[in-house]
């Protein structure tokens, strides 16, 4: 008999070629599967993540599910063993049983990303935020972000030639704010995201902040449904998958 479990984790994406298993490259998924399989008498354990993160992208809150044999009963002990086995860049926070049909990816109801920009040079944040020292018009960037809200086609802000059936996303929140330590943060929430969508969005909004384009250009860019109309993607190191949400009443046992 097998039992499905949800794992809440976080990871620093700097050492990895993204979440998904890659030929001849280290990934977060493969690292987790190797650790769980070792604890399962070397019988392979497949893990299914809530989504993909690209090379160098981090996760503040990430969910994956795995089906484990019944001899995995003590979840605190499993958490302890995994955290000892895994590299410092991956942390297991909680493990709990869920219903058989619960799915880490398809069951998610909302996803939030944050992008962190430091405008002062800091050698201790080289791989965890993006250094962008130029002066930015935050008010204009927030006016532009309003045009992202709602159910729209985000082809212009998506990586080309992906295998998704639709480029329609429902964006529920998009705004910039500054933390007390001076860090500039962009937060965006939606039901789903396309490949490279957040980084392309940040790159485009930064051009608004620099005065290269106006907030009113954003609807024109989206309506074009052409990736060439948007700006260069922002670097991966400032991007975090920040929070994954579910209808927990439908998932937890």
Image (cartoon, helix red, strand yellow):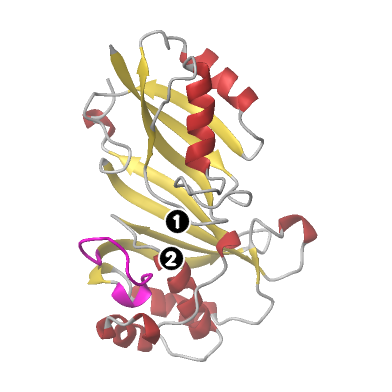
Q: Nearer the viewer, residue 45 or 234?
A: 45
**Which residue lies at the image location 33% right of the left edge and 78% below the top edge?**
156
**Residue occupying the far front of the picture:** 24
Where does the image place residue 19, in percent across and percent down from the top left? 47, 47
Q: Which mark is residue 131?
A: none
- Residue assigned mark 2: 198
What element does badge 2 sit on? helix
Residue span colored magenta: 155-168
What element does badge 1 sit on? strand
Per the image, is 201 magenta? no
Q: Find out whether the residues at labels 1 and 2 contact each other: C-beta distance under 8 Å.
A: yes
- Residue assigned mark 1: 113
- Category of crowding for the residue at label 1, using alpha-carbon neighbours closer than 10 angstroms: few (below 14), some (14–19), many (at least 20): many
Where does the image place residue 71, in percent across and percent down from the top left? 41, 8
Dividing the picture into quadrants, the one containing residue 31 is top right
Q: Nearer the viewer, residue 69 or 152?
A: 69
Q: Is residue 129 visible?
A: yes
- Category of crowding for the residue at label 2, using alpha-carbon neighbours closer than 10 angstroms: few (below 14), some (14–19), many (at least 20): many
């Amino acid at each position: 008999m097998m039992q499905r479990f949800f794992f809440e984790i976080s990871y620093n994406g700097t050492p990895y070629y993204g979440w998904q298993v890659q030929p001849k490259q280290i990934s977060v998924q493969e690292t987790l599967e190797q650790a769980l399989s070792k604890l399962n008498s070397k019988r392979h354990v497949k893990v299914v993540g809530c989504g993909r993160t690209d090379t160098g992208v981090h996760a503040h809150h990430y969910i994956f599910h795995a089906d484990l044999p019944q001899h995995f009963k003590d979840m605190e002990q499993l958490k302890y063993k995994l955290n000892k086995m895994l590299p410092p860049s991956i942390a297991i926070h909680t493990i709990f049983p869920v219903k058989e049909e619960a799915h880490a990816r398809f069951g998610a109801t909302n996803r939030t990303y944050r992008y962190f920009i430091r405008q002062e040079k800091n050698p201790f944040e080289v791989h965890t935020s993006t250094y962008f020292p130029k002066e930015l018009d935050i008010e204009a960037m927030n006016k532009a972000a309003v045009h992202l809200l709602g159910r729209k086609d985000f082809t212009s802000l998506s990586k080309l030639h992906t295998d998704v059936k639709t480029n329609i996303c429902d964006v529920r929140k998009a705004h910039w704010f500054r933390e007390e330590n001076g860090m500039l943060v962009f937060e965006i929430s939606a039901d789903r995201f396309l490949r490279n969508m957040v980084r392309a969005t940040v790159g485009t909004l930064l051009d608004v902040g620099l005065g290269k384009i106006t907030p009113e250009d954003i609807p024109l860019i989206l309506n074009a449904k052409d990736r060439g109309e948007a700006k260069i993607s922002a670097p991966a190191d400032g991007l975090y998958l920040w929070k994954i949400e579910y209808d927990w009443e439908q998932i937890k046992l």
